Image (cartoon, rainbow, N blue to C red):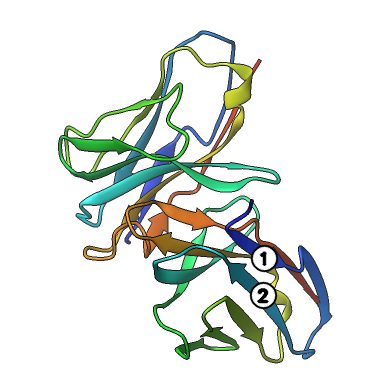
Amino acid sequence: EDQVTQSPEALRLQEGESSSLNCSYTVSGLRGLFWYRQDPGKGPEFLFTLYSAGEEKEKERLKATLTKKESFLHITAPKPEDSATYLCAVNQAGTALIFGKGTTLSVSS
Amino acid sequence: EAQVTQNPRYLITVTGKKLTVTCSQNMNHEYMSWYRQDPGLGLRQIYYSMNVEVTDKGDVPEGYKVSRKEKRNFPLILESPSPNQTSLYFCASSVPGTGDTEAFFGQGTRLTVV
């Protein structure tokens, strides 16, 4: 059973069309939830860390939020350069990071 | 420039021929780790190291070895590669105090074992 589930698997948006990516998790003893961005042919790039329900972080057009069961990555007025795969990961006490399979975002102009 | 450097970027090898993928970071990070990324499975940790001479198994360590003799280097060794080790491999080093969470990743090594 997947402990970290991301949806949708793929998302196509028009430039300026805001939307949200979802990351739901079932781990207990959550010690943090993390968002990474991965461009084709490159390693993941760290975006955000969230530690407690209600916490929010922002960076340019991205805003990450956290509840007790899931996290959302909101993308406001996206641009083509926001196209990438967005990875969610959780840190459970005593274990390595557990990654989701990612959401591939395509933004067309 | 802060970076994690992996070599080679691409490698095709035959079953059973020992190989080493090198990883070096220039940020003086203590924590380093290796991941593999497979379609439909996501990123999975192979081994990690909390400091020089301290290494431990991740989620999928079978068939791999690592060493950490210097702080900046963390090579991944496949003693007898098999086709199921065909994958995209990433080395990462992490900001102190964050475990393996706020990590800098290398560019990746695409390994094919035939």
Do the residues at discs 1 and 2 belong to one chain? yes
Image quadrant assignment for residue A30: bottom left
Instruction: Determine the secondary structure under disc 2.
Output: strand
Q: Position of residue A21 (x, y in %)?
A: 68, 76
Q: Which residue is at a point 60% across and 58% down the rendered structure image?
A: A100
What is the three-letter code of the residue carrying label 1?
A: Gln
Q: Position of residue B100 (x, y in %)?
A: 34, 56
Residue A109 appearing in the image? no
Mark 1 → mark 2, Cα distance in angstroms: 6 Å
For the N terminus of chain B, give its image quadrant.
bottom left
Give the left or right position of residue A44, taking residue B94 as reference: right
Residue A59 appearing in the image? yes
Q: Where is residue A57 in the image (x, y as percent from the top left)?
A: 47, 87
What is the three-letter code of the residue carrying label 2?
A: Asn
Task: From the viewer's side, name the closer residue of A20 and B4.
Answer: A20
Q: Name the residue under label 2.
A: A22
Residue A24 higher or lower than B6, as above or below: below
Q: Mark 1 points at which residue?
A: A6
